[in-house]
Amino acid sequence: MIRSLLSFTALALALGATAQAQTPPPAATYPTKPVRLIVPFPPGGGTDILSRLVATKLTEVTKWTVVPDNRAGAGGTIGITEAVKAAPTGYDLVMGQKDNLVVAPWLYKNLPWDPTKDLVAVAHVAYTPVIIATGANSRFKTLADVVAAARAEPGKITYGSPGNGTTIHLAGDLFEKAAGIKLSHIPYKGSNPALMDALAGNVDLLVSSVPSAMGQIKSGKLRPLAVTSAKRSSSLPDVPTVAESGYKGFDVSSWYGIFAPAGTPANVVTTVNAEVNKLLASPEMQAAIQAQGAEPESLSAAQFSTLLKTDYAKWKGIVEASGAKIE
């Protein structure tokens, strides 16, 4: 009897050990090594600025090691592709945004992934309006000046953007339609090259994310004319919206957030979401994000997933109506 009891106990312990070995490790064990945060755009742009801010603060507060890794190209889709192909362990994350996850799939017909199926929404970080600006020495003082000049000389006024088919480019296209004017779009490979040419006067206007342009606006080298969101930016409270400038209902903004490959363990998603949301609740982090011209906003992973799916469906029609093509 005793021998049978001992045998049963040993079997139970063995089965328990086996079950424990097969159970995914608890969230408390993540991460045990550096986490890579893929940045799908070049250094200096809005995505890069926010990615490095999040990586730095996560490293400081959690004592994790979060390393930004720029993988730019093809409208941000190269970095997303690398994230999709990564092992779903939580050690390869990516900072995605509306440009490469909502707009790009309707432009690049042969992308090897679907953002709503091949990625997991982990943590929303911020949203930002698009800004229409010009060099400090420009003849344009207001958005009305731009509209008047464009009506007098259709197609002659140029504007630079971070790339063809980006949310920022489409904001410019939607503004042209709303104002009934024709501008000439000059696409660049990222925000910083477009900014440099706007400062040099090589393009008349810059259409950009606020974070990408904020430093030059603060220095006085760039003159903001309008933001495209429904309400004014808290970082630029004196800059009117496009809607306030005479185009009622105009509202275009972008968002940024962290994603992981599909199949990433739920406990990892929950852990990263919780830590990012703690950061976003910090007055210091809120001030740092707002200083870059963005608006911090925390969401649950489920809420962020819904935002992605809703915008993905909505922007198909906007992209098609714009006639944007990848060059």
Image: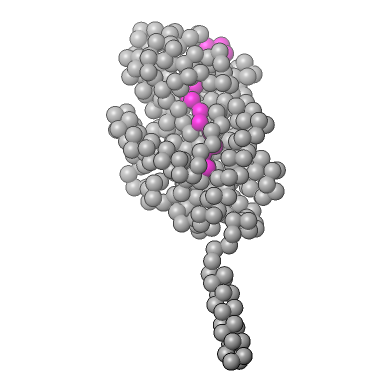
- Position of residue 28 relative to residue 244, above or below, is below
Instruction: Find residue 210 and report its image quarter.
Output: top right
Closer to us: 76 or 244: 244
Say which residue appears at 70% left-offset and 43% top-offset.
60
Residue 202 appears anywhere in the view: no
Q: Is residue 59 found left or right of 185 in the rendered image?
A: right
Viewer-closest of 165 and 138 = 165
Quarter of the image for the N terminus: give it: bottom right
Q: What is the magenta segment's predominant secondary structure?
A: strand
| Image quadrant containing the C terminus | top left
- Up the image or down, 316 lies above or below 267; here it is above
Residue positioned 53% across, 50% down in the render: 269
Q: Is residue 229 above or below residue 127?
A: above
Asked whether, in this view, residue 28 is left or right of residue 144, the answer is right
Residue 112: say if magenta.
no
Range covered by the magenta-colored residues:
123-138
Residue 178: where, in percent of width, then height?
A: 34, 17
